[in-house]
Image (cartoon, grey):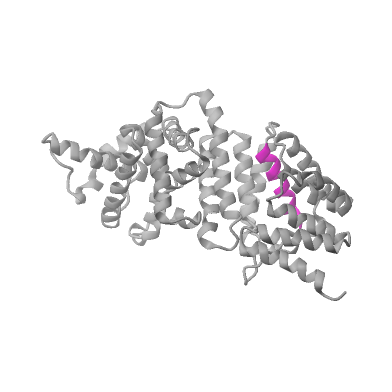
Amino acid sequence: MTTTALGDPAWINAALTAARPQAVAALLRYFRDLDTAEEAFQEACLRALKTWPVNGPPRDPAAWLILVGRNAALDGVRKRARHDPLPPDEQLSDLDDAEADLAERLDNSHYRDDVLRLLFICCHPELPVTQQIALALRIVSGLSVKQIARAFLVSEAAMEQRITRAKGRIAKADVPFEAPGPVERAERLGTVAAMVYLVFNEGYSAGPDPDRATLCDDAIRLARLLLRLFPTEPEIMGLNALLLLQHARAAARFDAEGQVILLDAQDRTRWDRARITEGLALIDKAVRHRRPGAYQVQAAIAALHARAPRPEETDWAQIDALYATLEYLQPSPVVTLNRAVAVSKVRGAAAALAMIEPLAPQLSGYFHYFGARGAFLLELGRKAEAREAFDRAIALANTPAEADHIRTHLDRLTSPA
């Protein structure tokens, strides 16, 4: 490592971020309290920011942070017991023997159990989904309360309350801190994956808002963490592939004014080829396991879009077939609505419209339903009905970008032929 890198704030910040899940998880096992574990980690980070630029980074940052964080949390107890306090900060990087011993004990199995425990606690079934997401972003990803509040468009005070309530529920629930067993892992893994997917969707659906769009990166970090814990689980491969392939289009999804650019109109040279390559490799690997799941199917759909050099070369028939599989695995009116878009490409707007008409009662408050319905009606020349659908879509838009996109369809209705 170069001398410049030793004191590079960006490198130190990246090292602290990467070590956070493992360090907080291990501290949680020691202290069995989320607040204590989080405070111990923060204290260790403060000491790292003071000592690493001077003495250089330790051989194992996570082990160093666990050791220093644990000692910092115990320091108050030691003082009350009239024990010696911690050594001076300048000596902390000389704790090589203790750090090495701890690193040896942090083998893959130990690390896996610690981080799983942390993830499972953040996604405890007694917590509402909103609290699960907030807690995971705060505890596992390390986002500040201000960042999370800004991303979810609530006040800092409200988000602080949400996280505090989540911690309180966990404390009252008397959550066991033993390593999760195989049955619990299987049951809870789906909950954790769903939480990660929800985090991603919060960012993906936010439009060009940079504060919320960063949630996509945080979700991908969490998904990668899950993949390290479950490297042979095809659905976790599928989840990672899906997020990477979707996020690969980020730079092409909006124009300079923040207007939505539909998939067929996007400049595909702006898609992130590195993310696409990684995503395609993951979904190909997942499919070879022959254990299909919803994330794999969605990733396979995204892969077909990514593999098409031009919009007209998209294999819409295969996408239709994949959506039919997804309807079987995960029945949902939203899945059927998405399938209707593929059907419109393969069999025409009339067939697509007939497919979504029965969904009206279930999707009466869903922006995308009325946007798709309006587009199908417009293609069929039923302009008055299309206008009505578009007006309803604008009323239900979640972001200004969504509303502006629908207004472009209305402009087509009013412009001379």
Magenta stretch holds residue 253: no
Overall secondary structure of the magenta section? helix
Q: Is residue 396 left or right of residue 416?
A: left
The foreground one among 351 and 4 is 351
| Quarter of the image where one finds residue 103 | top left
Q: Is residue 277 left or right of residue 97?
A: right
The foreground one among 5 and 108 is 108
Quarter of the rendering occupied by the N terminus: bottom left
Does 88 sit above or below residue 181?
below
| Quarter of the image where one finds residue 330 | top right
The answer, for residue 231, to whether it is visible in the render is no
Magenta stretch holds residue 298: yes
- Residue occupying the point 57% across, 34% down: 190
Q: Could you say where residue 72 lies in the image, as x and y percent from the top left?
A: 24, 42
Does 88 sit above or below residue 118?
below
Residue at far left of view:
82
Q: Is residue 110 left or right of residue 267?
A: left
Question: Residues in magenta?
Answer: 294-309
Quarter of the rendering occupied by the C terminus: bottom right
The foreground one among 409 and 348 is 409
The foreground one among 166 and 45 is 166
Q: Could you say where residue 235 lies in the image, as x and y percent from the top left?
A: 63, 36
The answer, for residue 154, to whether it is visible in the render is yes
- Residue occupying the point 52% across, 56% down: 214
